[in-house]
Amino acid sequence: MNRKVIISILILLALGIIFLVVLDIRKNRTDARPDNPYALGLEEFATVDSALVKYREVLDLELNETEKRGIAFGMEKIWLIGDDYLQVISTEGEQLMKRELPGSPTCITIYQSDIYIGFTNLIRVYDYEGNQKSSWASAGDSAIFTSLAVRDSFLYAADAGKRRVLKYRTDGTLLAAFDGKREPDALHGFIIPSPYFDLAIAPDGELWVVNPGNLALENYTPEGRLRGYWNKTGADINGFSGCCGPAQIAILPDGSFVTAEKGLVRIKVHRASGELESVVAPPQLFANGTHAPDLAVGSRGEIYALDFDRKMIRIFERKKP
Amino acid sequence: MNRKIFLTQSGRWVLLGGLAYLTGHIFFKRKVSASGKYVWQIDPFKCSQCGRCATQCVRDLSAVKCVHAYSLCGYCDLCGGYFKPNTLSLNTGAENQLCPTGALTRKFVEEPFFEYTIDEELCNGCGKCVKGCTSFGNGSLHLQIRHDLCQNCNECSIARLCPSDAITRVPIETAYQIKGDFINPALIKPKG
Amino acid sequence: MLFAAFNSLQAQQRFPKPEFKTEYTQPSPTTPEPRGVGMEFVDVALLILVMSLTAWFAIKKRSRKGILWLTVFSAVYFGFYRNGCICSVGSIQNVALALADPKYVISLYALLFFLLPLVFSLFFGRVFCGAACPLGALQDLLIFKPITIAPWLRKTLGVLPYVYLGLSVLFAVTGTEFIICRYDPFIGIYRMNGPYLMILLGIAFLLMGLFIARPYCRFLCPYGALLNITSRFSRRHLSVYPTKCIECKLCTTACPFEAIDFPDSEKERPDPKKSTRRFLLFLILIPVLMAAGGWIGSKSHVFLSKANQTVYTAELLISHPELRKDPLNLDIQTFLASGKSLETLTEEASAIRDKFYVGSWILGAFLGLVIGFMAFNQLIFRRKNEYQANRGTCYSCARCLDYCPVE
């Protein structure tokens, strides 16, 4: 091979090398990288038909940086529990009270003028000024209370640790526990894969408990017998997405359920029979990876959602028709 | 040529002295690891499941594999990491599965619990099941670098592009960060 | 028992798993051990052995065959078996980063791989390049029909290794990237596995290597730039002839790297006065070149800093805020979801850019110095009486030794 040919090949190779290096540099710029070919496509569920969205976000109350654990509505005020304190704010966002708590609260509910706060495995009762009225016995080391509901003189506590619902009298006596088994010889009752286990009492006095593993809402008699249930599976708008849900619920004055899901975070309203009534907050309103917001319902039917990641209370009201 | 030899010799001593100073500085003022290796590790709590573990590894089939922390798993029938978000039927049909290579297997344990295992020979480290499990489930599925496969490059090609800087160099004693083995305050907190 | 269980439950903060009623044993995740732990010690020992043998074959035994077999051994062991990583060329970055960052832990083996070839070169010349370096070994074994390159081109391209050295140290120190590793052409071939861009680069270099002997070693290798300097001060060095040169020029035909210096003729020697003047000229020129180089370097620091991820992302977000809404850009989305504020990112980016400013000044001044010295070498006369291996560029491959007819 004569010299000229070799030199031209060498020049070509040198240019090729420079080209490859430049190509590599350019391809790795932050704005030029290829998309993720293994992305989990949740986009199709992220957009919701706007005709279904019958609520609008009217107000956002920014909270301070410390971590919040739960929200409840009572006596026309918003009650929040943080990692070691109880905080009361007005519906306009003004802080009215803050009291330290002896321990880490996990759930809160308000009935008449008593505040019931669950601390992992025991319950304490406070008055509306934040003074402790009583402290009940522990339910055991592996109990984890995730939700409380009170009606008349009975309190129902959702124990996610032992997968059961405990029934107390409001003086602290433990009356009963039920584990949601459909048949006496069934292996398991409440299926609780993750620490989201919510319950609520409807305005007509009925106890509704979420069975997260079955994506169902179950109605129990005061004796703990299953009266009825409905479930909705699926990531589409009519169902509850993922393997456990809905993560949080609250009940509106007309008996329909406000539900918040985890994973594909959205807030919806389902009728007591289970059909979807409307969407309160579609997934677009939440950032990726947000936890399911905690819910509380106000006296006019407005919905308070405690957004843990954005650290704010988002207030939704029904749109005028 | 005495001058030349003299210059060469003094130059040599200067350079030797310089190298000795450099070595001494590194030995005494910096950290030198002689015992064992340093390896690359994924922090599963920082991982954002971007898919680059599958595409960027210098190996054909990535050294990153999905690992299952069974003690964190809910054993759900409707597994968020196994099934596509809107599957019609909960069976092991390939059309229902998220995993592009079919590496995640489902086995009945007892009603209503199912065990999910990863076949490491099929797993390509794409993180799709991890994303599903973290969003919808307990986050028991997570990605880890398997050190019997990893080449331990001087600079990990995946670490270079990780959007959340989840891959760092750690001593070999703590080579793996398997979930459930250690304390993470942000792990799972019951929220009422 | 109960107390321990209680404590562990509290410590692990793990949500209780389902209680299985049937006989079910839960498997545990596996943690496979890495391969080859402890092999580094063997690597260092073999490195020392190979370099010592190369020195012996080149200087004492004067045998090309021995070095050839050592080259093959290096390609097989350090190359194909150990996959060419960690290597001395890349160790520059590890050492630079260790000096700059007190938190960086450098492995002892990386440090030894950096030091040992340099120390050997101070005593025996570039014996590392001759037979121990896996990158060099591969290129050396694939020389087919080497052409000669015009001296002006050779000398000009000879600046590139210093540029590469400076850039790789700059990028390593600022924590940007290990560019030597990224653009290592041969590691993809040694691993027989890799992204196609890497393999293509390797093949291109090997094809070049068929006609230009050791292209990477001669015109790019940053470690070679260091060895070039240290080797000039070596105590002993490969000598083409054992006793006396008869000026037959056979050695120059043998050397594919044009590393053998020609003796000068009577006509070329200038008068001493001119030499002194030239010498003084360079005494002034070199600082000027350094200042000019440093100034140019500082002007390019913004451009260079863009290679850094943090700086580039910060700039991107500031100049294109609409990209925040782009759901497909993973890096920006992950950054936004991480909770880190743009202010923090911008602060970090500014700190890095300042480091680049200082670094680019030093880089520019260093390159000015290098260019100054190269010009100095060219224009200042040195008396050469015989054909002898150039101490800076000879790899001690011993090809010339077989050709020299002198006994």
Image: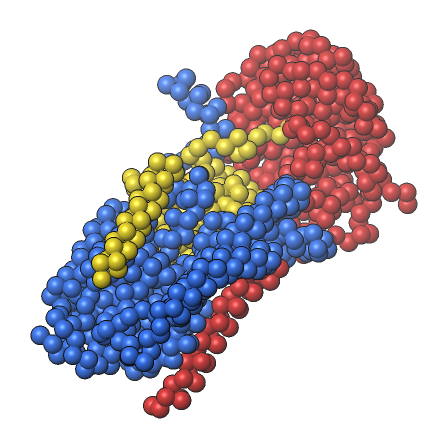
Chain colours: A red, B yellow, C blue
Q: Seen in the image, is A128 located left or right of residue A12?
A: right
User: Which residue is located at x 16 percent, y 79 percent?
Assistant: C246
Name the residue located 30 percent from the left edge and 82 percent from the top edge.
C145
Name the outermost residue toward the bottom.
A2
Q: Is residue A85 above or below residue C220?
A: above
Q: How many numbered tags mark residues here? A: 0
* Residue B66 appears in the figure: yes
Q: Which image quadrant: the C terminus of chain B?
A: top right
Q: Residue at x 35, y 69 (%)?
A: C272
Question: In the image shown, does A174 or A40 lie closer to the viewer?
Answer: A40
Left or right of A125 in this view: C198: left
Name the outermost residue toward the left. C407
Task: In this rendered view, identify the residue nearer to me: B15 or C215.
Answer: B15
Q: Is residue B100 visible?
A: no
Q: Where residue B158 appears, x then y in whole percent?
A: 47, 54
Q: Residue at x 42, y 67 (%)?
A: C278
User: With respect to residue C240, does C79 lie above or below?
Assistant: above
In the image, residue C235 above or below residue C407:
above
Side of C347 relative to B167 (left or right): right
The N terminus of chain B lies in quadrant: bottom left
Residue C312 location (% of width, % of height): 60, 54
When asked about the image quadrant of residue C62, the answer is bottom left
Furthest-front residue in this view: C273
In the rendered image, residue B185, in percent from the top left (x then y), is placed at 53, 30
Is A84 on the left-hand or right-hand side of B157? Answer: right
Name which quarter of the figure residue C30 lies in.
top left
* In-front residue for pair B182/C149: C149
Above or below, B69 relative to C242:
above
Q: Position of residue C407 (x, y in %)?
A: 8, 74
Name the one closer to the observer, B92 or A10: A10
